[in-house]
Image (tube, grey):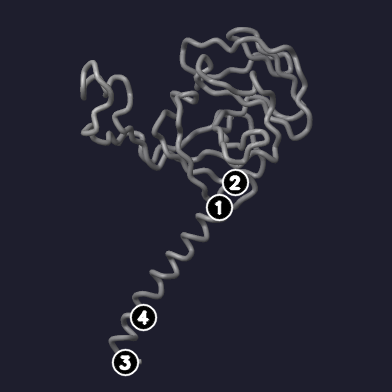
Amino acid sequence: MNKNLRGTFRFVQPVAMAIVAALLIRATILQTFSIPSNSMWPALQTGDHIVVTPYGSVAGSQVPRRGDVIVFRGAGDDRNFYVKRIVALPGEEIRIDGPSLFINGHILPESYLPRHYDNGFVMPRVLRQGEYFVMGDCRNDSIDSRDWGPVAGERVVGQARLIFWSSSDGSSDFQQAIAAPGRGRHPSVPLAVHWSRLFRLIHGAH
């Protein structure tokens, strides 16, 4: 191997190793998902792309905790994923009455919620082992455990950690009106990047 080839090899080898390591981490620790709705607003919004770490991994918590924003598979459907916040843990009693959410008889403070919301009504129930009660932060615009019951632990993919990209493609009613008043979406509407949301941490409420 001549001198030039050895120099090239010394440069390429660490780069190649870094790429392989990144791919392995991506495959085993990190997953990415996009947010299709505003059911988790204001924490997450349509167009956010998030990084998720599985529980028990080096990068993640060992077990789900109250306040965690999680991604999970739909019941009996491995193709669809949902993102919600854990509000009640296994063994706890949950009861909902309008704006008040009770855990074991005590109101749960939820500072992450928008000001005007309605939790609806849920009769008292005690969660079984491995069950988590999840809800969207935008309570008036979220389908969650109030509708289809608790989430089983084996359906949880991991904890949402970071918004790494956020954009919209001009499909909102407001952007459509600017592009072509009175008509459908205009194809020339540019991609709008939400710069202030990039690399924003997704905080739990613990």
- Neighbour tally class for label 1: few under 14, some 14-19, many 20 plus, Cα within 10 Å: some
Quote the CA–CA distance across marks 1 and 3: 40 Å
Q: Are marks 2 and 1 in contact (CB under 8 Å)?
A: yes
User: Label 4: which residue?
Assistant: 9
The disc label shown at residue 2, or none = 3
**Above-or-below relation of 187 to 199:** above
Secondary structure beneath disc 4?
helix
Name the side, left or right, on which 29 lies relative to 181.
right
Quote the CA–CA distance across marks 2 and 1: 6 Å
The disc label shown at residue 54, or none = 2
Q: Find residue 74 and report its horizontal and vertical position in percent.
A: 62, 34
The disc label shown at residue 170, or none = none
Q: Nearer the viewer, residue 88 or 31?
A: 31
Looking at the image, tell me whether mark 1 or mark 4 is earlier in sequence order. Answer: 4
Q: Find residue 163 and report its horizontal and vertical position in percent.
A: 42, 39
Quote the CA–CA distance across marks 4 and 3: 11 Å
Quote the CA–CA distance across marks 1 and 4: 29 Å
Q: Are marks 4 and 3 in contact (CB under 8 Å)?
A: no
Quote the CA–CA distance across marks 2 and 3: 46 Å
User: Label 1: which residue?
Assistant: 29
Looking at the image, tell me whether mark 4 or mark 2 is earlier in sequence order. Answer: 4
Residue at the image point whose x is 60% and y is 7% from the top? 98
Q: Are marks 2 and 3 in contact (CB under 8 Å)?
A: no
